[in-house]
C-alpha cells in the first residue's frame, strides 16, 4: 500500500517560490496498475520522483506499508 497525504513540493527560483505540488492526496492499493496523466508542467515527474525516493517533499505524509515517512 502506498498513500500520499497532503503532499506539497516547493522550489525556490530566485526570489520566487514555485509550488510544484499543492496538497496531493492519493492512495494506491497493493498490485494496482495506474497511469499518471496531465499537461506539461503539472507535477507528474515531481510526484513520481517523490514516490520513488529521488526527491524530497516540502510537507505532508508519505505512507508505505503503513509506515509514515515525514519530511526532515
Image: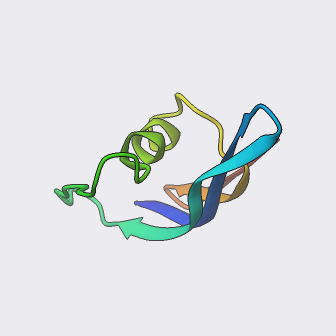
Instruction: Say how the picture is coloured.
Output: rainbow
Vertical order, 53 against 59 (above or below): above
Q: Position of residue 16 (x, y in %)?
A: 77, 44
Q: Nearer the viewer, residue 69 or 26?
A: 26
Horizontal placement of 28 versus 6: left or right? Answer: left
The quarter of the image holding the N terminus is: bottom left
Horizontal placement of 1 versus 71: left or right? Answer: left
Q: Which residue is located at x 83 percent, y 38 percent?
A: 15
Q: Position of residue 59 (x, y in %)?
A: 73, 56
Vertical order, 13 against 28 (above or below): above
Vertical order, 63 against 5 (above or below): above
Q: Which residue is located at x 19 percent, y 55 percent?
A: 35
Q: Which residue is located at x 44 percent, y 49 percent?
A: 43
Horizontal placement of 23 versus 29: left or right? Answer: right
Q: Nearer the viewer, residue 45 or 17?
A: 17
Looking at the rendering, which quadrant does residue 14 occupy?
top right
Looking at the rendering, which quadrant does residue 12 occupy?
top right
Q: Position of residue 50 (x, y in %)?
A: 52, 41
The quarter of the image holding the C terminus is: top right
Q: Nearer the viewer, residue 69 or 16?
A: 16
Q: Which residue is located at x 59 percent, y 64 percent?
A: 22
Q: Nearer the viewer, residue 36 or 70?
A: 36
Q: What is the count of numbered marks?
A: 0
Amino acid at each position: 500500500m502506498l498513500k500520499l497525504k497532503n503532499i506539497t513540493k516547493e522550489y525556490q527560483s530566485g526570489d520566487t517560490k514555485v509550488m510544484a505540488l499543492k496538497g496531493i492526496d492519493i492512495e494506491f492499493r497493493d498490485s494496482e496498475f495506474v497511469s499518471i496523466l496531465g499537461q506539461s508542467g503539472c507535477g507528474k515527474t515531481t510526484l513520481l520522483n517523490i514516490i520513488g525516493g529521488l526527491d524530497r517533499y516540502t510537507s505532508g505524509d508519505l505512507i508505505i506499508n503503513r509506515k509514515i515517512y515525514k519530511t526532515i
